[in-house]
Each structure stands twice: as structure tokens, then as C-alpha cells.
Image (cartoon, helix red, strand yellow):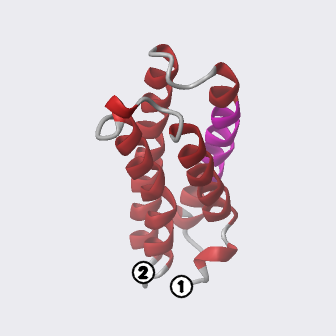
Amino acid sequence: MRNFRELIAWQVAFELVRLIYQATERFPKSEELGLKSQMRRAGVSIPSNLAEGAGRSTKKDFSSFVTIARSSLNELQTQALLSTELGFLSSTDMNQLQAVIDRLYGLLNGLRNSLNTEH
């Protein structure tokens, strides 16, 4: 359908994954298979689903993958909030992540809306 790397939503999601990897690097060893791993998987899922959806042949299929990406973003946000409460993420890290999460959420909603409009 289109080159996924040209999608602003994919670019922002890719940047979010980089930030997640940096922020979770400082998590305690005990979280190696816990929140650290879950946050990384949820983060990677977002641009991956956008890339897969962009390769689908219909707008409806692409829209479904955008919805999945948005769900992974919600999952990631929940995990980041918990990580902050537990003291694994600093408030500075959380503020930076939250700004990107908010921007990406808006981009995903806009992309999904544009795919669902009939022309």
C-alpha cells in the first residue's frame, strides 16, 4: 500500500521504541523478564504493526493493524506508569515518554480515521 517508513506515525513509534530501550536499560536485574521485557515487546509491537498494516492490500486491513498498534500503545503507557510508581522510571523519563505517547496516540487516531473514511 505504501512505504511504512514514510508514515509519521511509524517514525514517532520507532523513536518511542528507542526511548523505551534507553529508559528500561536502567531497570533492576529482577525486572529482566518482567516489566523491562514487557515494555520492550509492547513498544516494538507498535511500529511493527504499522509496518505490517501498511503492507496490506486494503485500507480496512491497514486500519485493523493501526488499532492493534494503538492497543499496544495503551499497554505500554500502563506499564510505564507502573514502572514510575515502582521507582524504575524517573519522572523525567516518564515525562519524556508521555509526550511521545500523547503525540503518537493522536497520530494513530488520525491515521485510523483517514483509513476509515469512504472516498
What is the magenta range? 96-107
State yes or no: residue 104 in magenta: yes
State yes or no: residue 51 in magenta: no
Left or right of residue 13: residue 43 = left
Amino acid under disc 2: Arg
Q: Where is residue 37, by image quadrant?
A: top left
In the image, residue 76 lies at what x, y percent?
A: 45, 39
Picture disc at residue 56: 2
Alpha-carbon distance for marks 1 and 2? 6 Å
In the image, residue 8 lies at what x, y percent?
A: 70, 63
* Prevailing secondary structure class for the magenta stretch in the rendered image: helix
Q: Nearer the viewer, residue 101 or 85?
A: 85
Few, some or many C-alpha atoms within 10 Å of disc 1 (few <14, some 14-19, many ≥20)?
A: few
Residues tagged 1 and 2 counted as in contact (Cβ below 8 A): yes
Q: Nearer the viewer, residue 50 or 31?
A: 31
Amino acid under disc 1: Met
Secondary structure of residue under mark 2: loop
Few, some or many C-alpha atoms within 10 Å of disc 2 (few <14, some 14-19, many ≥20)?
A: some
In the image, residue 66 lies at what x, y percent?
A: 47, 59
Mark before the other along the chain sequence, 1 or 2? 1
Left or right of residue 62: residue 106 = right
76 lies above or below 83: below
| Quarter of the C terminus within the rendering | bottom right
The furthest residue to the front? 29
In the image, residue 86 lies at what x, y percent?
A: 44, 16
Q: Residue at x 41, y 45 (%)?
A: 71
Find disc 1 in the rendering and name its residue.
Answer: 1
Q: Nearer the viewer, residue 96 or 103?
A: 96
Q: Residue at x 67, y 63 (%)?
A: 11
Secondary structure of residue under mark 1: loop
